[in-house]
Image (cartoon, rainbow, N blue to C red):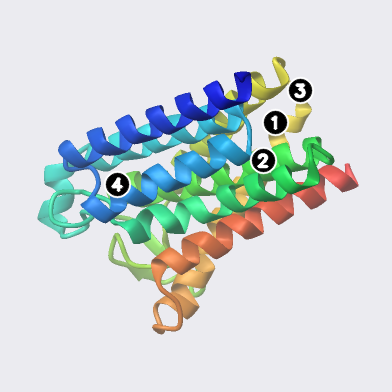
Amino acid sequence: MEMLLEIAIVLLISALLSFGGWKLNLFTPLGSLAAFITGSIVGVFGCVEWFILLMVFTLAGLATTKAHYKEKVAKGLQEGQRGERTHKNVLGVGIPPCSIAVVSFFLGGDYSDILNIAFISTLAVAAADTIASEIGTRDSRVWMITTGKRVEPGINGGISVLGTISSLIASFLISLLAMIMIEQSVSILVLIPTAAGMLGNILDSIVGATLENNGHISKYGNNCITAIAGAIIGAVMYILI
């Protein structure tokens, strides 16, 4: 009975936030549906802590997207027509944590420590990438990660000092929050998802500069692949340490 109540609460919260996001023009209709499905999968197949973390990350990401929105519009760097996220945006970020939640469910709680790190790492990569993209565009000094040449802000593979520092802070903060929520304490292990988040973000820039700019992969596919890579990196680091 308790499990059914938790599932009902998860579905209700996912529905309310997704609907609210759509009404506030933060999601397209399909984006709202994708957000509901993503949140529901993590909450039902994963755990309450993972679900809350995903909700916090989503809300923070949407708030960051809306920050300095007029400036982004002037530069042509906004998401959608009004900053709204489509189903592709949501699934590109949401598939990795959903996958880990499903794996966790079928493993019956085994390897929970590794899966916790992997889950947190996917969000750390997404947070680092989101912040680097949103805040990094405010820095006019941008270099292509593969060549070191100066490029325009917003180009795939472009990195800046402001974006890099901001992404590191974002990766650390989401990792810190996650560790506090899941472990009820803070340890040196917080550095694992922080590092995985940054490495995944760097990989995102490399893939963006090569495969994405050449049209071999979309930015949503890039987000998905690099978040999964971040989860693997985090899990491997945990095992080795």
Answer yes or no: do the residues labelled 4 and 3 have beta carbons within 8 Å? no
Q: Mark 4 or mark 1: which is in front?
A: 4
Q: Secondary structure at mark 2?
A: helix
Q: Position of residue 149 (x, y in %)?
A: 41, 72
Q: Secondary structure at mark 3?
A: loop
Answer yes or no: do the residues labelled 3 and 1 have beta carbons within 8 Å? yes
Instruction: Please tell me which residue is depicted at 79% across the width and 37% down the height of the picture.
Output: 109
Counting residues from the start of the chain, the first of labels 4 and 2 encountered is 4
Q: Is residue 234 left or right of residue 52?
A: right
Counting residues from the start of the chain, the first of labels 4 and 1 encountered is 4
Return the residue nearer the eye: 124 or 199: 124
Return the residue nearer the eye: 14 or 1: 1
Find the residue positioned furthest to the top: 184
User: Could you say which disc has been placed on residue 187 in the image?
Assistant: 3
Instruction: Please tell me which residue is depicted at 62% across the width and 58% down the height of the picture.
Output: 228
Q: Secondary structure at mark 1?
A: helix
User: Could you say which disc has been placed on residue 32 in the image?
Assistant: 4
Instruction: Please tell me which residue is depicted at 79% across the width and 35% down the height of the picture.
Output: 113
Q: CA distance from mark 4 to mark 3?
A: 36 Å
**Few, some or many C-alpha atoms within 10 Å of disc 2 (few <14, some 14-19, many ≥20)?**
many
Q: Position of residue 69 (x, y in %)?
A: 17, 43
Against 178, is 119 above or below? Answer: below
Q: CA distance from mark 4 to mark 2?
A: 28 Å
Answer yes or no: do the residues labelled 1 and 2 have beta carbons within 8 Å? yes
Q: CA distance from mark 4 to mark 1?
A: 31 Å
Check disc 1 and report the residue beneath it: 190
Against 66, is 173 above or below? Answer: above
Return the residue nearer the eye: 67 or 2: 2
Counting residues from the start of the chain, the first of labels 3 and 2 encountered is 3
The three-letter code of the residue at mark 4 reads Ser
